[in-house]
Image: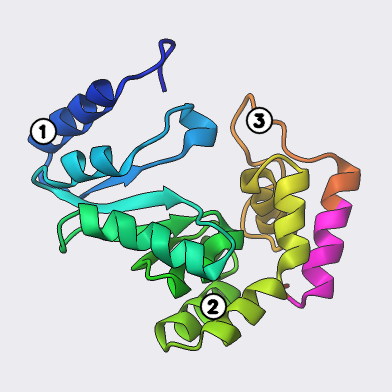
Amino acid sequence: MTYQALTADDVFELYRTVTEHTSLPVIVYDNPGTTHFTFTADLYARIARLPGIASIKIPGVPTDPTRAAAHVATIRAAVPEHVTIGVSGDAFGATGLNAGCDAWYSVIAGTLPAPALAITHAAQAGHATAATAKSERLTPLWRLFAEFGGSLRVISAIAEHLGLVRPRSLPLPIQGLTVEQRSRVTQVVDELGLA
């Protein structure tokens, strides 16, 4: 993120510079909500040809399965075969995997691995309906993500509720959820049997 709006050339040069200075695999992190920059398929293609680019994390997919598959196919056609495509936005995980994404860059998987694995395994096995149903069961959680401004605060509250991290674990300046919001998160976790 920068103070000045970035151009496609700015972003390309950032990835070129990073890949020149590391032997580690590099993942393109496309998050327009945070960076205020929108990648194009052409920019994905330019960056994906750099040595060391391993994956592209795309920001969600259209909710319609046909449109989602077309979106992923457009990106797939633009990037080399060895570069994986991963979906982000947990509510889009099943749809993205069903649409042909190779990976799901999940928020819940680090804290609640069982439901994330169930969705992933169903999609990988070609059981699109089951993957979608497993994701839709978590709709109350996805709604909390949307209502509370993203997944970070909600997942932090869940990790605190489960005793995985100390209370108020988010770094400043992020304040986390209020007591009332935390209570709602705990209720959803308990109702979904995620604890």
Mark 1–mark 3 CB contact (< 8 Å): no
Q: Which residues are magenta?
A: 183-193
Classify 13 as above or below 22: above
Q: Which residue is mark 3?
A: 174
- x, y percent for residue 61: 50, 56
Labels 1 and 3: the sequence-earlier one: 1
Q: Could you say whether the residue bearing mark 3 is in a helix, strand or loop?
A: loop
Measured in 3D between alpha carbons, the distance from the residue under mark 2 to the one under mark 1, in whole angstroms, is 36 Å
Quadrant (top left, top right, bottom left, bottom right) of the N terminus: top left
- x, y percent for residue 130: 59, 86
Q: Is residue 61 left or right of residue 39?
A: right
The amino acid sitting under disc 3 is Ile
Q: Could you say whether the residue bearing mark 2 is in a helix, strand or loop?
A: helix
Q: Which residue is mark 2?
A: 119
| Structural crowding at the residue carrying mark 2, measured as other residues with C-alpha within 10 Å and reported as few (<14), some (14–19) or many (≥20) | many
Q: Is residue 22 left or right of residue 26?
A: left
Query: Residue visible at 21% across and 30% down?
Result: 12
Residue 190 image-quadrant placement: bottom right
Classify 67 as above or below 24: below
Q: How are the colours assigned in the image?
A: rainbow
Labels 2 and 1: the sequence-earlier one: 1
Labels 2 and 3: the sequence-earlier one: 2
Q: Main secondary structure of the magenta part?
A: helix
Mark 2–mark 1 CB contact (< 8 Å): no
Q: Which residue is mark 1?
A: 21
